[in-house]
Amino acid sequence: MLNFYRDIWFEPTNIMGEVLEMYYNMIMMYLIFIFFILFFLFYFLFNFWTSKVIISHMMEFLFFLFPIFLLSLFLFFSMKALYITEKLFGEMYSFKLTGNQWYWSIEMKNNMINSYIMNSDLNYNLRNIDTSNHLFIPIYTPTLIMISSQDVIHSVGFPDGGLKVDAIPGRLNTLEMMSYHIGTLNGFCTELCGPLHAFMPFQIEFVI
Ligand SMILES: [Cu+2]
């Protein structure tokens, strides 16, 4: 419905993105609705001929009840969105992603490979985005990524996917993702973790 922001924001590539978009649309519709309510409220308040609404106890009661109702709706949809993003829906693969100062390492069963930033002097690389090794995930395949850290707190965030999970030492956070599109999802460390914090990107390739 309210898709005009798609050019400047993201197009959902996964389930979390869809949930975020739905939530955003819902909040947007309520805000427009509230704007109209406020408009009519001020219209009545400053209109001399209808100024008797000011002393209406019923109106006062409604203006007390109505915001409570709206806030309860906000709470309901926020909790719903929060719990959907935590939900696991039957993963087919699982990887472990470990944050290190300042690179990511990918593990699957007994295999481990490090993903470092590529030298941006080579002009065919995307500066501060390209990495030496990518994580390949088939599209339409629910994949569980377990995220932890070896040293300090890191966080992996994918702005185009609407995803962000903290990598905390001694703790395993999970992120289940399923992409609808082929392509590369560029991730960045989003928790200040040292002098080279800006130089530890991470890339996921969604393939067929
Ligand atoms: Cu980091």
Image: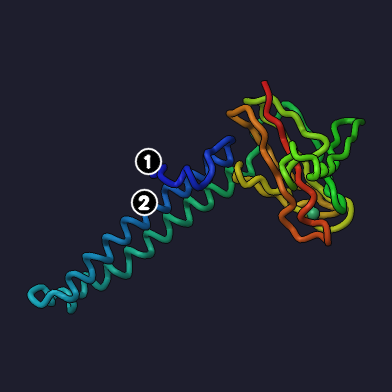
Q: Nearer the viewer, residue 98 or 187?
A: 187
Q: Which residue is under mark 2? A: 29
Q: Nearer the viewer, residue 109 or 69?
A: 109
Image quadrant of ligand 1 equals bottom right
Q: Which label belongs to residue 58?
A: none
Quick one: SS at disc 2? helix
Q: Earlier in the sequence, mark 1 or mark 2?
A: 1
Q: Amino acid at mark 2?
A: Met
Q: Is residue 207 left or right of residue 100?
A: left
Is 104 situated above or below 33?
above
Q: Residues within 10 Å of mark 2 (few under 14, many from 20)?
A: few
Q: Amino acid at mark 1?
A: Met
Residue, x 72% and y 28% (percent of image)?
137
Residue 121 coordinates in the image, percent (x, y): 80, 44
Q: Is residue 134 left or right of residue 176?
A: right
Q: How many marks?
A: 2
Residue 70 coordinates in the image, percent (x, y): 38, 59
Q: Which residue is under mark 1? A: 1
| Mark pair 1, 2: CA separation | 9 Å
Is 36 situated above or below 113?
below
Residue 4 coordinates in the image, percent (x, y): 40, 44
Q: Are marks 1 and 2 in contact (CB under 8 Å)?
A: yes
Residue, x 84% and y 40% (percent of image)?
115
Residue, x 80% and y 40% (percent of image)?
122
Q: Nearer the viewer, residue 25 or 120?
A: 120
Is 155 situated above or below 137?
below
Quick one: SS at disc 1? loop
Q: Residues within 10 Å of mark 1 (few under 14, many from 20)?
A: few
The quadrant of the picture occupied by the C terminus is top right
